[in-house]
């Protein structure tokens, strides 16, 4: 499984369904310099940033 697939799966768990996850994954985020989470997940560094943000969201600690 590649980083994008892992992020998609994690987002679905955090948001509870694919539709909400897809919305979050495809909208530019200020926290990511205007990039979308899916764009960032293409690189190792970006993947780690998105993964960390999803972990924060799952614990109610979003930045």
Image (cartoon, helix red, strand yellow):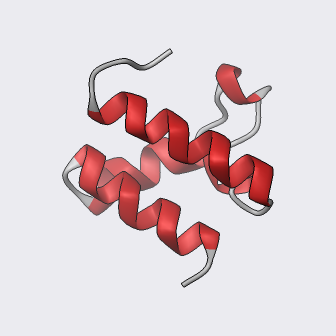
In the drawing, does residue 28 fall left or right of residue 8?
right
Q: Position of residue 13 (x, y in %)?
A: 26, 55
In the drawing, does residue 14 fall left or right of residue 48?
left
Q: Residue at x 49, y 69 (%)?
A: 6
User: To which quarter of the image does residue 61 belong?
Assistant: top left
Q: Position of residue 34 (x, y in %)?
A: 77, 29
Task: Indicate whether 27 appears above or below 42.
Answer: above
Please, which residue is most extreme toward the bottom here? Answer: 1
Q: Residue at x 68, y 57 (%)?
A: 41
Q: Position of residue 31 (x, y in %)?
A: 67, 22
Task: Indicate whether 12 appears above or below 15.
Answer: below
Q: Residue at x 67, y 35 (%)?
A: 28
Q: Residue at x 65, y 40 (%)?
A: 49
Q: How many marks?
A: 0
Q: Position of residue 36 (x, y in %)?
A: 67, 43
In the drawing, does residue 23 fall left or right of residue 46?
left
């Amino acid at each position: 499984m590649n980083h994008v697939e892992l992020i998609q799966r994690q987002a679905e768990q955090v948001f509870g369904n694919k539709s909400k996850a897809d919305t979050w994954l495809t909208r530019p985020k200020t926290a990511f310099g205007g990039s979308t989470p899916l764009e960032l997940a293409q690189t190792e560094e970006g993947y780690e940033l998105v993964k960390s943000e999803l972990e924060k969201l799952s614990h109610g600690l979003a930045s």
